[in-house]
Image (spheres, rainbow, N blue to C red):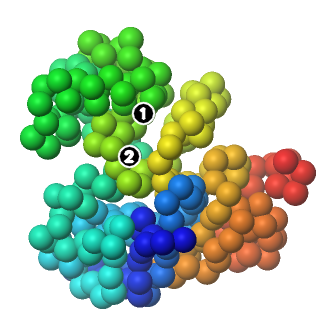
Amino acid sequence: MGVPVLEVTSLAYAYPDGNQALFGVDLHVHRGERVALLGPNGAGKSTLVLHLNGILGAAARSGTAAGTVSVSGMPVEPTNLAEIRRRVGIVFQDPDDQLFMPTVRDDVAFGPGNLGLTPAEVEARVHEALEAVGMSEYAGRPPHHLSFGQRRRVAVATVLAMRPEILVLDEPSSNLDPASRRELAEILTALDVTILMVTHDLPYAMQLCERSVVLSGGVIVADGPTRELLSNAPLMATHRLELPFGFDPTRV
C-alpha cells in the first residue's frame, strides 16, 4: 500500500507532571483511508492527536516522549514542523479556537497567505475550500455572526485551504443539530482526503469510517472494520463505549 500517510510507532508520552498518557501506541493510516479513533474519556486520544503535528512530544520539547511519528515518511521533529503542520490539518472541537479574523475569507486565507503564495493563488485556495464546505456565499461575513454548524464548516475550510495530506477531526459532530450533523457528514464524504476522526459519536463513526481503532488506557486495544468493532459487545463494555438506545450496527 506504499508509505503510510500517518505512521505512529511505539509512541509513549508522559506529561511534565508525571501523568503517563500513552504506553506504546502503534498506528498506521494509508492514503484514502477514513479511520475513526474511538475510546473512553481519558484514553489518550487528544494526547495522540497533539503528537501528529508536533504540538506535544519530542518535537515540542514538552513532557517525556518515546517512539516515532511520521507523515508520508517525514519524521515529526523540529526541523520539519512547518511542512508537517501543512500536511496534517487538525480541526479542533471548538471552531472558535480556529476562527479569529474579521471575515470568513480572511480566516480561510490566513494559512495559505503564510505559504508564500501569490494573492491570486491564495484567493483560488479560499474559493476552493469554501466551495468544498458549502460556505462560499458567507465569505464576507464575520465568523461570529454564523451558526455553530456554519463555523465548524468554516474551520474545516481553513484546514482544507492548506491542502493537507490527512485531515484530523476532533469530535466533528459535537454540539450540532441533526440537520447540521447530516450536512457535515455529506461534506466529509465528498472530500478527497485521508481522514482520522476522533469521536464518541459511534453511529457517525460507522457512517463515515470503514475502519476504526479503539484507544484505551493509552494503548490500541482493537483495530478493524467499524461495524465489527461496534458489534463486539464485550469489547464495547470493557472500554466504556456505548451505542445509542436502539442503534444496532448489525442491522444498519
> Whole-percent x and y of residue 165?
38, 54
Left or right relative to 41: residue 86: left
Q: Is residue 123 above or below residue 8?
A: above
In which quarter of the view is residue 214 placed?
A: bottom right
User: Do the CB atoms of the residues marked 2 and 1 lie less than 8 Å apart?
Assistant: yes
Q: Earlier in the sequence, mark 2 or mark 1?
A: 2
Q: Is residue 220 above or below residue 113?
A: below
Q: Which residue is mark 1?
A: 152
Question: In front: 159, or 60?
Answer: 159
- Work out which residue is located at the far front of the displayed protein and give it: 2
Left or right relative to 144: residue 174: right
| Residue density around tag 1, few if under 14, some if 14–19, many if 20 or more, within 10 Å | many
Measuring 50% from the left and 53% from the top, which residue is drawn there?
195
In which quarter of the view is residue 176 placed?
A: top right
- Work out which residue is located at the far right of the displayed protein and give it: 251
Measuring 28% from the left and 71% from the top, which residue is drawn there?
74
Left or right relative to 82: residue 41: right
Measuring 78% from the left and 67% from the top, which residue is drawn there?
228
Q: Is residue 5 above or below residue 140?
A: below
Measuring 19% from the left and 74% from the top, which residue is drawn there?
77
Q: How many marks?
A: 2
Quarter the N terminus occupies: bottom right
> Whole-percent x and y of residue 36?
58, 59
Mark 2 residue element = strand
Mark 1 residue element = helix
Q: Which residue is mark 2?
A: 91
Q: Amino acid at mark 2?
A: Val
> Whole-percent x and y of residue 134?
47, 22
